Image: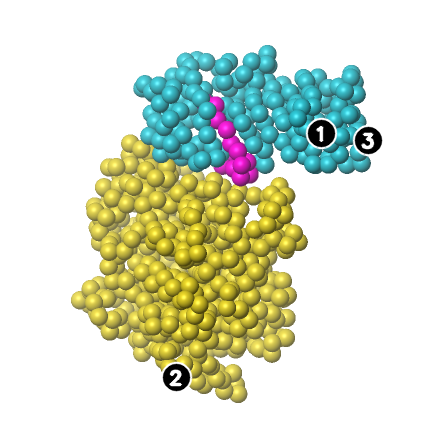
Amino acid sequence: MEERQLAAIDRLLEAVEKPARYIGGEINTAIKPRVKETAAFAFCFPDSYEVAMSHLGMKLLYYIINREPDMLCERVIMPWVDMADGLRREGVPLFSLETRTALRDFDIVGFTLQYEMSFTNILEMLDLGGVPPLSSRRAEEDPIVLVGGPCAFNPEPIAPFIDCFLLGDGETAVVEMTRLIKSMRLAGRPRREILEALCGIEGCYVPSLYEAQYREDGRLSAFRPLSAAAPATVRKRLEPDLDALPYPDEIPVPYTEIVHDRVALEVMRGCTRGCRFCQAGILYRPVRERSPENLLRLAEKLIAATGYEEMSLSSLSTGDYGHLVELVSGLMERFVKSRVSLSLPSMRVDSDVKEALSQVSEVRKSGLTLAPEAATQRLRDVINKGITEQDISRSVSDAFENGWSSVKLYFMNSLPTETDVDLQAFGDICRLIIDRFRQTPREKRGKGLSISLSSSTFVPKPFTPFQWDAQDDMDTIRRKHALLRETLRIKGVSFSWNDAELSRMEACVSRGDRRLAQVILRAWQLGCRMDGWREHFRYDLWMQAFEECGLDPDFYASRERDRDELMPWDFIDCGVTKAYLWRERERALRGETTPDCRGGCEGCGLKRFPGACALA
Amino acid sequence: MKMFVVYSVTGRLRYIGHLDLMRAMQRALRRSGLPVRYSQGYNPHILLSLAAPLPVGMEGLREVMEVPFEGSVSESEFVARLNAALPPLIRCLGARAVDDSHPAPMALLGAAVYRVEPQESAGQLFEALPAMLSRDSLPALKKSKRGMVEVDLRPLIYNAFVRDGSLKALLALAEAGTCKPELFMKALSEQAGLEAPAPFRCVREALYTASFAPLEEA
């Protein structure tokens, strides 16, 4: 970067809110020397620093790429709007935190996609970093733009912006991709050849080598590769043995406070519960656990290298981890003296956690979080959330007896088959919890019960049994929110919900096709960015973008699909078959549950991946 | 016992806030394995107290904090182990063991020396300095909890002179009264007849007691 631009960065840092977001220099970050042969990878996160630095996947891949002698990885994070505007005004390209290198000066620009409503931030970051947002406009010397993460499983709405997607586990694939790209760039191979070569790596999807055709009514009619190098079906990348993969034993420690400011230890990947609304539960199959010995070793190293005072056990369903009690006891033994506290997020209320809970509370008392998702047994059966009222009752009683007094409840509204009875039952659950609190002896329970209940509007996602379903229309969502506000006027209960407009846009983008990319591009040109942040979300501009592009949001969000409709993501084999998902949908509509497949194979399709699923 | 620790915060790390710096210190102390003391209660944290918050954007060359510890650790070992754990832009420059009953640095603090570099109109400002210092009073508006209040800055400016193209200012920094560099520069800009306060860079070079002894030696 030029002297003038570096001076401008200093000026901007004097003026922006939270300048610590942009300074880098955190402990355990890497500044590696760069020579011509080094593959320079910019790991991009399309949300604020506080969100980015809370993300485990970024720390994981950052560590993995930087341990390769011929590669370097630096972080580039979406600047807050004040900084973004400042960079544009001063003519300073978006830069890496480590060395203030412009985004366009990397070999590879790799985004992780955790959330659909961060798509406009990709365009904003590319544009700020001097990389043409449309891949068709990129010149030979421009970086290759990669994307991974759960949202890559419906790649079509951002297909024109991305050179290559990686579907599935990234640990070994990212190194293979980086090495291949760099060696071909050094050899002076053209972009097109590099992209065709990437198709040979399992999990890679190169959108420019495929074409989509549509019927008159807008539905997809055909989707096929245009090159012999591109496979008709792209199979996700799957790492069967987590213990065999590298895992960071040191992670960056931010100065400024972030969302999850602690060591996160990924105990396992995948989930066998089969909740029918949950995309992650399908995409991360099969369940793969790390050994407790490996985890204890990593935990000790991470605490010593970071100085963190808190650790969480992370996974989709930590309560199901096979060696939970052994692991928690081992951690407590090591951490009581050094005063490290342990938190267990996303615990299933039906897990056998009593013993673990009582140990955790020795160090730190925090709140209990429960996610019943639906308030009636009927609807919980529809979504296959295997929790009963007794489970909830038992969990809160246990927690209250251990001195806890705050409960967070996560629900969804607008689930398939939902009626007002299901919504009014939110209040019954709260009253049940209040009863249990009152029944706990005064000397045991904490002071002042507080229940915070949040409800998010259901968004049908690809690769779930509800991928065919319509989302509630806006009027219905608004009416349901009003009903919930009325129902939840209960002392000690606070209720929050998310914007109906945002949920609707999320539904459009989640199941969008390639045509939707025009809308995203137009919305960004109109000024949309940071859409996930209420204060920046501009529904009016999104609507304008839809209108200008001649597309109908209802087509994407509130339309029920036919069983045989060709979905924009059907060319991806995520491990679970479409036939299984349809069978699950039919069961859902009949109110039939499907048991956890650890008790017996339900035939989801993962068995087709040799050696992937260890379950009987 | 507790350690009086001298440290610097420089370069890009001048942009971290006071609480960020506290956390960074606590985590460095954890990494160092030094025998520090913890607070009681459910969320125990390392006890430590910084003499004065360093404003965001300002470097500090000789800041002071106290760190209570137990057992025995020599001053030089403390410095070495803390430095090994600190990020490169925070440096521990010295440590002195004092008794627990010794007053906290915050209580002893009285003044600070700043190096102020005007980014515009430096000549005019330097020329105006003697006239400003010769005045009996310098009324200024200062933000307080009850809104804007008028204060007299003059008794809070102990000394100021020009050296090597920048201003050195010894300003009050105490519970009883503080003159922030912003207010000093605002008054000087007015004295120089500038329409708006001149933009400036500022470094806090050292902290002193009310009797102008180096704080770390008090």
Question: How far is the residue under mark 3 from the one under mark 2?
Answer: 79 Å
Subunit under mark 2: A
Looking at the picture, tell me which residue is in the foreground, A584 or A492. A584
Chain coloured yellow in this rendering: A
Question: How far is the residue under mark 2 from the one under mark 1?
Answer: 73 Å
Q: For mark 2, what is the residue?
A: A564
Query: Dot 3: what SS?
Result: loop
Disc 3 residue type? Gly
Query: What colour is chain B?
Result: cyan
Subunit under mark 3: B
Q: Give the range drawn in magenta.
A: B5-20
Colouring style: by chain
Residue lying at the far left in this picture: please name it.
A616
Image quarter of residue A440: top left
Image quarter of residue B193: top right
Q: For mark 1, what is the residue?
A: B185
Disc 1 residue type? Met
Disc 2 residue type? Asp
- Quadrant that contains the N terminus of chain B: top left
